[in-house]
Amino acid sequence: MDLGYTPALRYRALSAWYDSVMSWTMRESTFKSRLIQQAHIEPGQRVLDLGCGTGTLTLMAKAQRPEADVVGIDADPTILEIAKAKSNAGGLEIEFEQGMSFELPFADASFDRVLSSLLFHHLSREAKSRTLKEIVRVLRPDGQLHIADWGMPRNSSSEFSSSPSNSWMASSPHLTTSSDCCPALSGKQDSRT
């Protein structure tokens, strides 16, 4: 059965184990804390955690920046129930929405920051392009996108740390629609295969 998305740990039956597996295999709190610091979230800003999964980054952002309005979105209803339970247990007021990254249910220019952690490697090339267009749509003109994911992007618009521990953490603090650096954002075709 095609769900239209990849469940956490690839199989829905493993979703309940996602947080445990992440804590055993990744330095999740380290790279997610860096992502939040890098985003420089200000009081009163609206922040979207795109592909929020179990809400770990969403909850960390709200806990570290309680005066910000933090929203999480994910396609998987099972994993969102885990995120909501964690938020309730932590006493944090966070809005969680179910939806696809390339069809965001939010108004234009409604977020100051979009954060994404370990989502983009799950997306096809077409879905990545559509997702980036949606991010541009929902970000305010001075908004910022911050991504942590596997692998290095294949364009020059991202900035990277030289440290091996976070060489995969990319920041795109000022999105551009220049076809030279981001063909997906300009609507022009990318010639790479």
Image (cartoon, rainbow, N blue to C red):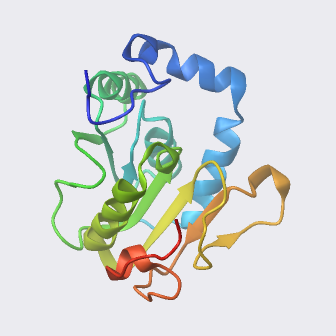
Q: Position of residue 123 (x, y in %)?
A: 42, 48
189 up-or-down from 56: above or below? below
Which residue is more in the foreground, 173 or 190?
Answer: 190
Q: Quadrant of the N terminus?
A: top left
Residue 158, above or below 21:
below
In depth, the one of 168 and 83 nearer the eye is: 168
Q: State whether residue 44 appears in this view.
A: no
Q: Which residue occupies 33% across, 35% down?
A: 5
Q: Is residue 154 left or right of residue 128?
A: right
In-front residue for pair 138/101: 101
Left or right of residue 47, residue 26 in this image: right
**Could you say where residue 101 lies in the image, as x and y percent from the top left?**
31, 51
- In this rendering, position of residue 166 left or right of residue 133: right
Residue 104's quadrant in the figure? bottom left
Q: Which residue appears at 51% of the width and 21% of the height?
A: 18
Residue positioned 48% across, 76% down in the render: 191
42 or 187: nearer the viewer: 187
Residue 25 appears in the rendering: yes
Q: Is residue 71 above or below residue 75?
A: below
- Spot the residue most to the top: 13
Total marks placed: 0
Q: Position of residue 125 (x, y in %)?
A: 42, 57
Q: Position of residue 73 (x, y in %)?
A: 30, 44
Q: Is residue 155 left or right of residue 113?
A: right
Looking at this view, name the residue that lies furthest to the right: 163
Q: Quadrant of residue 185?
A: bottom left
